[in-house]
Amino acid sequence: MTTQIKLGDITVDVVFKDIKNIHLSVYPPAGRVKISAPLRMNIETIRVFAISKIGWIKKKQKKFQEQERETHREYLDLESHYVWGRRYLLKIIEINEVPSVELKHKMMILRVRPGADDKKKQAIIDAMVS
């Protein structure tokens, strides 16, 4: 069972589960707040718990808002791309073959058909490295 409670400008998703203890989580990137609570727990008790943790919640949300976000990719030669936490420099080769991605040392070699747009390049990379 899921419900929501409002704490001023913060909306908290409350999920009732077959668990022993209450759990509070704040998720990136927007700082969504979720509480997992035992089935037997009263919603007012959960509200009091959330209010007691409001400082911690706001601190976590602020931390997520201040984090650097990855910039929009233009799919140009020597542009940085991250795969599995490692940085690779993109090398684009336009060739009339089946599109492919190859990771070599610190280079990500992307072979695409001539005239491929950014969306197509992104789709090829996403399909090959995920």
Image (cartoon, rainbow, N blue to C red):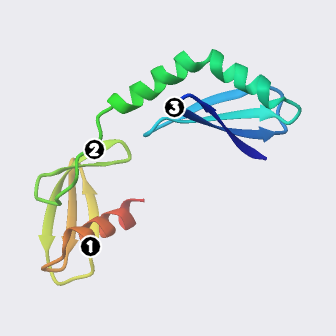
The three-letter amino acid code for the residue at tag 3 is Asp
The three-letter amino acid code for the residue at tag 2 is Glu
SS for dot 2: loop
Q: Position of residue 29 (x, y in %)?
A: 43, 40
What label sits on residue 70 in the rendered view? 2
**Separation of marks 3 and 2 at Cα, in angstroms:** 27 Å
Dividing the picture into quarters, in which one does residue 122 lie? bottom left
**Separation of marks 1 and 2 at Cα, in angstroms:** 19 Å
Dividing the picture into quarters, in which one does residue 34 lie? top right
Q: Assess disc 3: are there few (<14), some (14-19) or many (≥20) residues with their C-alpha within 10 Å of its C-alpha.
A: few
Q: Which residue is mark 1?
A: 120
The three-letter amino acid code for the residue at tag 1 is Lys
What label sits on residue 9 in the rendered view? 3
Q: Mark 3 or mark 1: which comes first in sequence?
A: 3
Looking at the image, is 120 positioned above or below residue 73? below
- The one nearer the camera, 55 or 94, is 55
